[in-house]
Every structure is written in structure tokens, then in C-alpha cells.
Image (cartoon, rainbow, N blue to C red):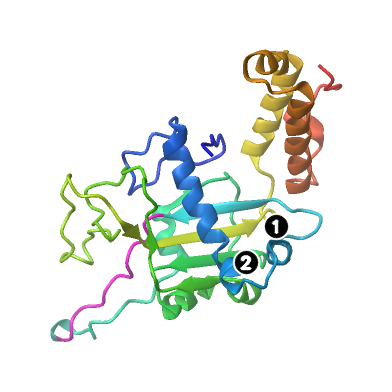
Amino acid sequence: APLAVPLWSAQGPPALPGLRREVPYEASALIGVALQNVTLPYRLKGSQRPSSFLSALTPSHRPVCGILQAFPLPESPAQPSPEHGGNGGQCRQTLDSLSSHFFDLCAMPVGLMNQHTSLVLRGASPRRLVSLCSALSPPALRLSFCREAVLPMPLPFPQVFGPAVSRKGILAEASYPSVAPRDESQEVVSAPVATLLHAASGAGRSVALGRMAVAARSAWKSGVSRLLESKYGVEGDEFREVVEAITEQLECSAADVDDGDYGDDGDDSG
């Protein structure tokens, strides 16, 4: 389903310069990739319930999570060849080195020592997962997962990738000069992906989520719910449930913050 996300990064994903975030089809495709990757561990196990997986990631009093996404995930930088003093293998890589490739879908601060964290890689080796998790807490490593097969692009998928992304989703960077840029007539058919799912616990309050709560309450009080009902068939009770859900998530993600800090001015009855 097409979605709009008012919480994500102001700066777009670096490898997706053609992404139009105001177009629901393109926005929902990006979100769909993130959700599919985040849920990969328990879907592969088959026997694990989603609630069991998520409960390990979220303290009961703060069930809100944020998602960072690197799509496509860049290759590990190669070491110099033996004739240049290296071994031709892969350099050790940390999450900090990927910071410029991560796109924040939820505007939530990230604490690397947050034990309620799960890093999921597709198109990467177990060694790379261990390397990237070196800055995370030991419980986070146990919640992390990798699969060496890359993510095949579903059809149709919006082709919003930059020319530096090959058909197989490999970024043509200085460390991989042999990767030729993709011709404009070619589509990206697969790509490596990384997602970092992290609980709000220990991350501090989400200012963006607070603003979203204020906007939802203001819309409720201004009579927007009646307009939605007359034009789109969205009943007032459904809109109220949305407002209540956002408020509940705000309280869970920032239990130490007074509701008044976000401009609550009393009754939400409209």
C-alpha cells in the first residue's frame, strides 16, 4: 500500500537521486524494502512468531523502533593488492564508515550501545556482519543476521537508482573501479541491503514524532476528520484511533517527556 512518511531524513538516500518522496508508489517501495529486510530473520526461521522476535528488540515499556537503511549496501572496501603491500582481501569495516549510506526512516537517535538493536544484511558475508557489529553490544550481535544472497527487485520496482548503481546493485566507487556504471536503458534487478532496527529505549525522544502528534491533534480539532469522512469515507472514530495511536507511541518513545512539551492544549474531542 502506498505510504507517506513525514519522519524520515530531510536528505534523500545517496544512491537513489531519482526518488520522489512525494510519490506514494516510490515512497512505499523504499519502505517495503526496509520492512522486508528487517523481518527476514524470523521469516526464515518459520517457527518464530513476529511478536517473539520484536519483544526481544523492544522493552515492554517502550515498544517504538527506528529503522536505518542502506540501499544499496556498498561493497566492503578492498585492501591494496599484494604488489602494493596488501593482501587483496577486504578491509575491516564499521558501522560508522557506512553512516553516509544510511537513510533514516524514523528520525530517531541511534545509540550504538543500545542492546535492543538488530542489524540485517543481504548480499554480505557473516564476516562482514561481525565486523559491522563490532561497535554494538553483545546482545545486539545475537539479534543480528546476514544472508549472502542479494535482494531481488520485485516487479515492477521504481527505477530511481543513480547511474553509479549497476544492474546487480553494486555501487561503482573508488574502491571498486572495475564496476562499470549502468546504462540508462538498463534496470537494477537486485541489490544488497542493510537495515538497522533499533528500539527507542536509550535513544532519547523523537522530536519528529512529537511534531507528528501535534499535527494529528491539530487536524482533529480543526475538523479535518469530518472532511476525510465526507470525501474519503474515513469515519471520525477511525481518525480518533490514529490520533490516539500516535499519542501512545509518543508516550512510549519518550516516557520522561511531559505531553505539554509537544503543544498539547487539552481536550482532543474536536
Q: Quadrant of the N terminus?
A: top right
Residue located at (26% from left, 46% from top): 162
Magenta-drawn stretch, dominant element (helix, strand or loop): loop
Q: Secondary structure at mark 2?
A: loop
Q: Position of residue 103 (x, y in %)?
A: 46, 49
Residue picked out by circle 1: 202
Three-letter code for the amino acid on which mark 1 is drawn: Gly
Q: Quadrant of residue 259?
A: top right
Residue located at (69% from left, 45% from top): 205
Q: Tell me the number on the disc at residue 113.
A: 2
The question of residue 35 being in magenta is answered with no
Contact, CB < 8 Å: mark 1 with mark 2?
Answer: yes
Note whether 118 is above or below 134 in the view shown. Answer: above
Horizontal side, residue 85 vs residue 35: left or right: left
- Mark 1 and mark 2: span between their CA atoms? 9 Å
Magenta segment boundaries in residue numbering:
71-82
Q: Position of residue 79 (x, y in %)?
A: 26, 77
Residue located at (29% from left, 70% from top): 77
Q: Tell me the number on the disc at residue 84.
A: none
Horizontal side, residue 262 vs residue 118: left or right: right
Q: Quadrant of residue 215?
A: top right
Q: Position of residue 253 (x, y in %)?
A: 73, 47
